[in-house]
Image (spheres, rainbow, N blue to C red):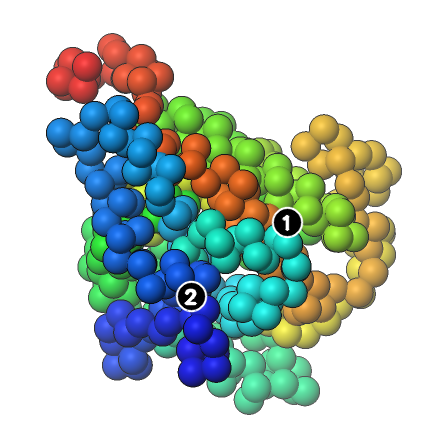
């Protein structure tokens, strides 16, 4: 795509634990990519606003482009996100969504990670292909899909022991994206996808305006999913709270970054499954919609493509909100726009007075 399109630039970001060369793709209009260093500089300045006046911050927000980082996940047994990133790139570059795609290309610089754990993706594909058609088709990988810490690769957000974690932080601090979207796949069945608003509790250090924007993006994604005939999104619940600061994506919330996050439905790698309502938990069989679960999935076949299509839509909705609220989101990247945070922190601990 880099060779074929002036809307894509491939950038090498290092090597994985197993020594694979690792890339990200920058995707935007050719004029934006030609000036991408200027847009990076604006993001840097707003993220580190020492000495910047409010008026200067507003001028920068008017000029800048929202930098959104979307990744193909780091949990390799969750198999759709690493497939959706390539399709997302193609759909954007080829303007599959017409005006929506064009507005995104114009207002956003997408930092696209095909995968946050390329080694694990290779391991899972190899294992699955070798088991396909045998009684072990759905068997777990008999080793860790990250060489040292497996699934714990998403608990390394502050320890940064793995070279994958270090690469992720280095790239995030280089670009200072205003939005980071990390995909996962453990939807609270029979909901087809979980999206923000996050469950309670939220961390007292979480900037309130950023929390509000995360909720807005989650709701926008659910709405676009419904518009495109993919029902079953849910929010909040009890599983995915906004408290633990060690996730590789979520730790960025404390850098004033909007953390978009989802858990899409999955059944066994790429093996389809048919569900009837009788497969649902008893409390869900009455099919009663709720405020945070307004459209219901009623069963049927679930294939890898269902998961990929939901991710494509949720990623597109996130980019769409970033494009529509470009200036507002850039301005919120300036940490001083979080005065309510300081109210939340008052009385939290002896050091809070230094924030005010
Ligand atoms: Zn996951």
Counting from the top left corner in percent of width and height, residue 339 is at 31, 18
Circle 1 packing at 10 Å, graded few (<14), some (14-19), many (20+), is: many
Q: Residue at x 62, y 45 (%)?
A: 221
Q: Which is nearer the eye, 193 or 338?
A: 338
Residue 240, given in percent of the width and then of the height, sits at 50, 40
Q: Which mark is residue 30?
A: 2
- The answer to whether residue 156 is seen in the rendering is no
In percent of the image, x 75 and y 68: which residue is there? 273
Question: Helix, strand or loop at disc 1?
Answer: strand
Quadrant of the frame with the C terminus: top left
Determine the image quadrant of residue 257: top left
Image vertical order of residue 68 relative to residue 76, above or below: above
Query: Mark 1 or mark 2, which has the lower sequence index?
Result: 2
Report which residue position mark 1 lands on.
193
Mark 2: which secondary structure? Answer: helix
Residue 55 in the figure: left or right of residue 118: left
Residue drawn at 42 percent across, 65 percent down: 30
- Is residue 209 left or right of 341 when viewed as pictured? right
* Farthest-out residue, top: 347
Residue 12 percent coordinates (x, y): 28, 74
Picture residue at 66% right of the left edge, 59% below the top: 98
Q: Nearer the viewer, residue 262 or 329?
A: 329
Q: CA distance from mark 1 to mark 2?
A: 34 Å
């Amino acid at each position: 795509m880099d060779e074929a399109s002036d809307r894509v630039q491939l950038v090498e970001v290092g090597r994985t634990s197993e020594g694979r060369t690792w890339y990200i793709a920058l995707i935007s209009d050719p004029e934006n990519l030609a000036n991408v260093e200027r847009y990076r500089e604006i993001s840097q300045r707003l993220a580190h606003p020492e000495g910047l006046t409010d008026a200067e911050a507003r001028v920068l927000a008017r000029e800048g482009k929202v930098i959104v980082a979307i990744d193909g996940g780091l949990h390799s047994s969750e198999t759709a996100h690493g497939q959706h990133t390539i399709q997302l790139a193609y759909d954007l570059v080829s303007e599959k969504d017409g005006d929506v795609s064009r507005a995104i290309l114009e207002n956003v610089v997408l930092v696209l990670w095909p995968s946050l754990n390329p080694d694990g993706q290779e391991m899972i594909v190899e294992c699955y292909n070798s088991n396909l058609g045998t009684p072990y088709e759905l068997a777990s990988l008999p080793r860790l899909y990250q060489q040292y810490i497996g699934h714990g690769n998403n608990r390394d957000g502050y320890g940064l022991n793995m070279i994958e974690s270090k690469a992720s932080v280095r790239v995030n601090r280089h670009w200072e994206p205003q939005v980071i979207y990390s995909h996962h796949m453990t939807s609270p069945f029979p909901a087809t996808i979980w999206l923000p608003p996050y469950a309670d509790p939220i961390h007292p250090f979480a900037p309130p305006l950023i929390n509000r924007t995360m909720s807005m993006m989650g709701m926008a994604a659910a709405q676009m999913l419904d518009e495109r005939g993919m029902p079953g999104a849910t929010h909040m619940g009890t599983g995915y709270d906004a408290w633990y600061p060690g996730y590789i994506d979520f730790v960025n919330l404390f850098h004033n970054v909007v953390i978009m996050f989802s858990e899409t439905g999955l059944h066994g790698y790429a093996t389809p499954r048919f569900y009837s309502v009788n497969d649902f938990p008893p409390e869900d069989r009455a099919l009663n919609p709720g405020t945070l679960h307004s459209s219901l999935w009623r069963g049927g076949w679930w294939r890898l493509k269902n998961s990929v299509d939901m991710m494509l839509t949720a990623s597109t909705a996130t980019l769409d909100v970033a494009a529509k609220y470009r200036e507002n989101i850039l301005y919120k990247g300036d940490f001083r726009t979080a005065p309510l945070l300081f109210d939340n922190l008052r009385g939290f601990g002896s050091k809070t007075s230094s924030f005010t």
